Amino acid sequence: MKQLTKAEEEIMQVLWQLQKANVKQIIDQLPEPKPAYNTVSTIVRILESKGFVDYEKQGKGHIYFTLLSKTDYSNQSINVLVNDYFQGSFKNLVSFFVKKNDLNLKDLESVLKEINKKED
């Protein structure tokens, strides 16, 4: 799977939230300073060429929608992260966060409960 750039991911976040939108509606949801219409239009066309979005014709314009759910993209991104930085081991990922103090005991217990649910 192709990875999204920061700008592409920002557009995808808006489309995941709105489900369907034209370029103007996407821009309206972006933080200040708003990017130019042509910039967003170009990014959306790149996302289309990468297979992340498609469109429906509406009058003279297009209504864009995602072809990949946010959950599916998140899962694939986490797998890439784990494979690229943690030798394919989720244990190494969790260990990293524990060592960096980004994961406290309560959070770790919560993760363990989720793992136990999955094993049942």
Image (tube, grey):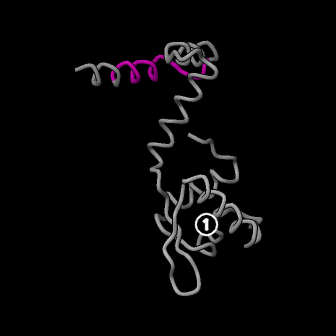
Foreground: 44 or 118? 44
Left/right of residue 63 with respect to residue 36 in the rendered view: left
Point out residue 81 in the picture as x, y percentages from the top left corner. 59, 27
Specify the farthest residue to the bottom: 59
Position of the C terminus by quadrant: top left
Foreground: 99 or 74? 74
Residue 68 vs 43, above or below: the answer is: above
Left/right of residue 105 with respect to residue 22 in the rendered view: left
Position of the N terminus by quadrant: top right
Q: Residues within 10 Å of mark 1 (few under 14, many from 20)?
A: some
Q: Which residue is mark 1?
A: 29
Say which quarter of the image contains residue 39. Answer: bottom right
Point out residue 6 in the picture as x, y percentages from the top left corner. 69, 48
Judging from the image, what secondary structure is the residue with disc 1 in? Answer: helix
Left/right of residue 111 with respect to residue 37 in the rendered view: left
The amino acid type found where label 1 is placed reads Gln
Q: Residue at x 47, y 51 (%)?
A: 68
Residue 88 falls inside the magenta stretch: no
Q: Residue at x 49, y 18 (%)?
A: 90
Point out residue 104 in the picture as x, y percentages from the top left corner. 52, 19
Specify the farthest residue to the front: 49
Residue 22 vs 110, above or below: the answer is: below
Say which quarter of the image contains residue 43. Answer: bottom right
Foreground: 93 or 68? 68
Q: Residue at x 57, y 74 (%)?
A: 22
Residue 26 vs 119, above or below: the answer is: below
What is the span of residues highlighted in magenta in the rendered image? 101-113
Point out residue 97 in the picture as x, y percentages from the top left corner. 58, 19
Left/right of residue 58 with respect to residue 84 in the rendered view: left
Magenta segment, prevailing SS (helix, strand or loop): helix
Residue 110 falls inside the magenta stretch: yes
